Image (cartoon, rainbow, N blue to C red):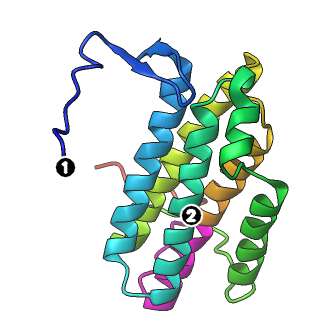
Amino acid sequence: MGKIYTKHGDQGKTGLLYGGRISKSDPYLAAYGTTDEAVSALGLARSLSDSTDIKSIIKSLQEDLFTIGAELSTSPKDYSKLQEHFTTVSEKMTLRLEEKIDELTGKFELPKSFIIPGNSPTSSALDMARTIVRRAEREAVKLYEANLLANSEVLRYLNRLSDLLFILARFNDRTKGFEQFKDPSSKRSKS
């Protein structure tokens, strides 16, 4: 293996998937960099989980996020090249998330109170990944609104993904007995 450092980014520039150097403060980098953060947070959740089912779901989501990252690092003018060489985000991928949400929520009743993250290591990592995905969604919306994102299905996928991560965290805690809720009507103690 060659050296990990290339020095190409030392001047604050990086490349898009199909060419072109952009600033590391560019909206493209904010979007796909945030997606990369989500992949890592999901890796933490997967490593903490002792459920083969949850691990399998998370691994699949990490793979999907690589597809999302490719979309977010491709300009619309080069989108046909991406479609030619790689899988792109499809409605089928988003529907698969909805099916998984429905499957999991069919196994337990959703809480009717606020959830304070931190009940278990796995759900905490899933909740962290969920908030990162929400940020990735906001960054992707910026690209879409600026006509820099060719495929609007990316937005729908990210929106459903954050919903699935919320449900997956709750499912984990329910099955492990870690679940704790906060009654939204109770007043905080003032200490």
Residue 147, picture quadrant:
top right
**Is disc 1 placed on a helix, strand or loop?**
loop
Q: Which residue is mark 1?
A: 1
Magenta-drawn segment: 166-182
Apparent side of residue 74 relative to residue 145 in the rendered image (left or right):
left
Which secondary structure type mostly characterizes the magenta part of the structure?
A: helix
Instruction: Name the spot of residue 130 as percent of width and height, x first.
Output: 52, 54
Evaluate whether residue 118 shows in this view: no
- Residue named by callout 2: 61
Name the residue: 58% across, 41% down.
70
> Is there a contact, CB below 8 Å, between mark 2 and mark 1?
no
The amino acid type, in three-letter code, at marker 2 is Leu
**Residue placed most toward the observer, 51 or 181:** 51
Q: Residue at x 58, y 64 (%)?
A: 166
Tag 2, which secondary structure?
Answer: helix
Q: Amino acid at mark 1?
A: Met
Q: Which mark is residue 101?
A: none
Res 156 visible: yes
Q: Nearer the viewer, mark 2 or mark 1?
A: 1
Q: Quadrant of residue 74?
A: top right
Residue 171 vs 24, above or below: the answer is below
Q: Position of residue 186 (x, y in %)?
A: 54, 61
85 sits left or right of 132 in the view: right
Q: Position of residue 88 (x, y in %)?
A: 71, 48
Rate crowding at label 1 as few (under 14), some (14 to 19) or many (20 or more) other CA atoms within 10 Å: few
Magenta run includes residue 104:
no
Q: Residue reaching furthest top?
A: 11
Q: Position of residue 48 (x, y in %)?
A: 32, 75
Is 180 magenta? The answer is: yes
Q: Residue at x 44, y 88 (%)?
A: 51
Q: Nearer the viewer, residue 11 or 146?
A: 11
